[in-house]
Image (cartoon, rainbow, N blue to C red):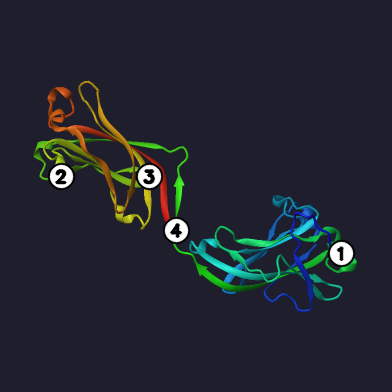
Amino acid sequence: MFCFFSHFPAPSRSSVNSPPAHYVLKVQSFSLLVKNSIERYESETFEAGGYKWKLVLYPGGNKSKNVREHISLYLALDDTSSLHHGWEIYVNFRLFLHDQNNDDYLVVQDTVGKERRFHKMKAEWGIDQFIPLRDFNVVSKGYLVDDTCAFGAEVFVCKERNTGKGECLVMMKDAITYKHLYEFDNLSKLDSEFCDSKPFNAGNYKWKIKLYPNGRDAEFGNYLSLYLTLVDPSALSHGSKIYAQITLRILDQKQAKHHFGKASYWFSASCHENGASRFMPISNFTNQNMGYQMKNSCLVEAEVTILGVVDAVS
């Protein structure tokens, strides 16, 4: 008779004559697993129901779940990286232990007939207390004979479901600030309303500083406009975003009283440019005594700190 602590739900147990339909894991010299500090063993992959699986064996119990004096046995979905986000597999499975004396099998299920849901975030189900070691080691029970035993699994995929698309937000620890200084020259000879800096790297992305020396849209003729823009926003996948803190600064080349603006923005394929349309009055920018524009050029500095990234997953 098996004895379980009350805080572990007792699994269902029965005996059958047929071997497991999908996989058998035979172990010779079982005692050497624990002796050689093999706390967890994963079988080779096997296929059932159109998916690949593994048996995961803890010969001395799953210590991460505070299991002692038992064997723990689990079914694990192999290579979850190939699964789309939101894809779920509902599975009914049984775990086996060969009784070598009677040539039949102990069958253990955590809950009879209950389907288990496998997905990227939960790819492993099984029995924490598969069998007590004191019973497993009794030769008359036939589970361990000549230090050899055999486990097995049957896996039946009941249904599959796609719960839809999603996203993954990663906020950056110890975010790095990138600086880039660029000189815009020949401002009076521009043949367009704006000028771009050369591309520069910040994080894993390329950026440009975009300067409108005569202003943009409604601010034309009144305020200088200044922006930071992604160089290739079309490279971002749909739903991907970058959360960045930016500081844009026009240097005062005379008195070092630099004019700057600082803010945080979301950048994406549909919103790849952020900044200020009213960054500085044009009258201040063109005033030679203030030092922002000297000899028909100005120095603009951008600081970019990537604070977070959202990637679409499907």
Percent position (x, y) of residue 132?
Answer: 82, 59
In this rendering, the label closer to the viewer, 2 or 3: 2
Indicate the quadrant where residue 177 lies.
top left
Q: Nearer the viewer, residue 8 or 189?
A: 8
Percent position (x, y) of residue 172?
Answer: 45, 42
Amino acid type, mark 3: Tyr
Residue 182, compared with residue 70, is above or below; it is: above
Q: Is residue 112 left or right of residue 293?
A: right
Instruction: Find disc 4 in the rendering and name its residue.
Output: 166
Amino acid type, mark 1: Met
Instruction: Find disc 2 in the rendering and name its residue.
Output: 217
Q: CA distance from mark 1 to mark 3?
A: 60 Å
Q: CA distance from mark 2 to mark 3?
A: 26 Å
Is label 4 in contact with label 1 (beta carbons under 8 Å)?
Answer: no
Indicate the quadrant where residue 78 lies.
bottom right
Dot 3: few (<14), some (14–19), or many (≥20) neighbours within 10 Å? many
Amino acid type, mark 4: Gly
Which residue shows up at 75% across the image and 64% down it?
11
Q: Is residue 204 left or right of residue 274?
A: right
Residue 88, compared with residue 297, is above or below; it is: below
Which residue shows up at 9% across the image and 39% down it?
189
Is label 2 in contact with label 3 (beta carbons under 8 Å)?
Answer: no
Q: CA distance from mark 3 to mark 4?
A: 18 Å
Percent position (x, y) of residue 16?
Answer: 78, 76
Instruction: Find disc 1 in the rendering and name its residue.
Output: 1
